[in-house]
Image (cartoon, rainbow, N blue to C red):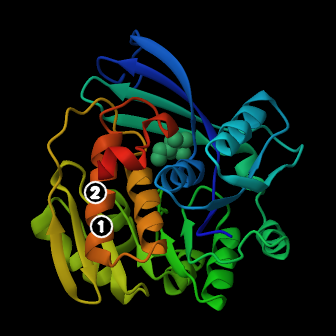
Amino acid sequence: MTDVVVVGSLNMDLVARVARAPVAGETVSGESFETFPGGKGANQAVAAARLGAQVAMVGRVGRDPFGRTLVALLAAEGVDVRGVSDDGEGPTGVALIVVERDGGNRIVVVPGANGGLRPGDVEASVRAGLWEGARVLLLQLEVPGETVVRAAEIARGRGMLVLLDPAPAPPRAGGLAPEVARLLKAADAVLPNQLEAEALTGIAVPGPGAAGPAARALRSLGPRTAVVKLGGDGVFVDVEGEIWHEPALAVDVVDTTAAGDAFAGALAARLAAGDGWRRAVAYANRAAALSVTRPGAQPSMPRRHELEG
Ligand code: RIB
């Protein structure tokens, strides 16, 4: 039986650490280079699985060594990968990531096979029984919009909780794209960072004091719950008008990559286990804090004993 279904991306992350990122036209010397398994969808699946949830992943990789490695690593984490197909069209997604000494990052994603994930793949995963028993669907925006919308609508029809991490931020030229608007209507909760909150609402969120109006605006678009992630300033939460601020924990930051994924995966795991929002958000906040103390995306996801010990 499944607790959490993740429909989303798998990427191989190609990571250079630098003293500072180059500006346009500049070349800088890197301090190290490593590859890590990544992709917002797969990262969130690993985060939830390491914290005790039974997770099924629906996604696409290319028929290449990166794809095989990503699927094998995900399976080794205990994630059900029967919904991850290798389409033979296009390479596995990659992310080019530059991490500065303060742990901040800049990311370019080349979607490759992720861009081939279709609504029919999601429907096939339901027919195959991968969604049986699932209470939570976890979504991001690194696979085609129509696929994400279909997954959200299926989950709603099954009475599941739909969590949307709206990353990367959707473009907002001329207002919200119709697909994004539809998705927000089908989501129970939206989990943006500051940039994503602004992209969805047009309201800047420079800090916790300014998050209220953006959270309200997000809720007016559909979700009953808005959780705005504020990086080093913690998270601002609005659950049907019940509002609180969860401060960030003080940690030594090594690499902020996938902190939001640690948060989303942990939140999904705890909500699926029956926690209320206050408890689940506090737990997810601890998971995100621990993840930034270690390098890489999936390798940085915390395990249960680290959060509960
Ligand atoms: O959220 C971090 C992730 O974004 C990385 O793992 C990278 O693959 C991109 O999807």
Can I make out residue 129 in this image? Answer: yes
Residue receiving disc 1: 281
**In terms of depth relative to the viewer, which is nearer, 259 or 31?**
259
Q: Give the left or right position of residue 288, taking residue 55 as reference.
A: left
**In terms of depth relative to the viewer, which is nearer, 284 or 179?**
284
Q: Position of residue 151 (x, y in %)?
A: 67, 75
Residue at x 53%, y 50% (from the top left corner): 40
Q: Amino acid at mark 2?
A: Asn
Residue at x 54%, y 85% (from the top left corner): 186
**In terms of depth relative to the viewer, which is nearer, 163 or 270?**
270
Image vertical order of residue 253 relative to residue 111, above or below: above
Residue receiving disc 2: 285
- Sort mark 2 into few (<14), some (14-19) or many (20+) by Cα contacts within 10 Å: many
Image vertical order of residue 210 relative to residue 8, above or below: below
Q: Amino acid at mark 1?
A: Val
Quadrant assignment for the N terminus: bottom right
Q: Furthest-right residue in view?
A: 88
Q: Quadrant of residue 221?
A: bottom left
Residue at x 49%, y 70% (from the top left corner): 164
Spatial CA distance of label 1 from label 2 is 6 Å
Residues tagged 1 and 2 counted as in contact (Cβ below 8 A): yes
Q: Position of residue 58 (x, y in %)?
A: 71, 60
**In terms of depth relative to the viewer, which is nearer, 31 or 125?**
125
Can I make out residue 194 in this image? Answer: no
SS category of the residue bearing label 1: helix
Q: Give the left or right position of residue 149, taking residue 101 as reference.
A: right
- Sort mark 1 into few (<14), some (14-19) or many (20+) by Cα contacts within 10 Å: many
Q: Position of residue 294 (x, y in %)?
A: 36, 31
Q: Position of residue 225 (x, y in %)?
A: 35, 81
Q: Give the left or right position of residue 16, taking residue 91 as reference.
A: left
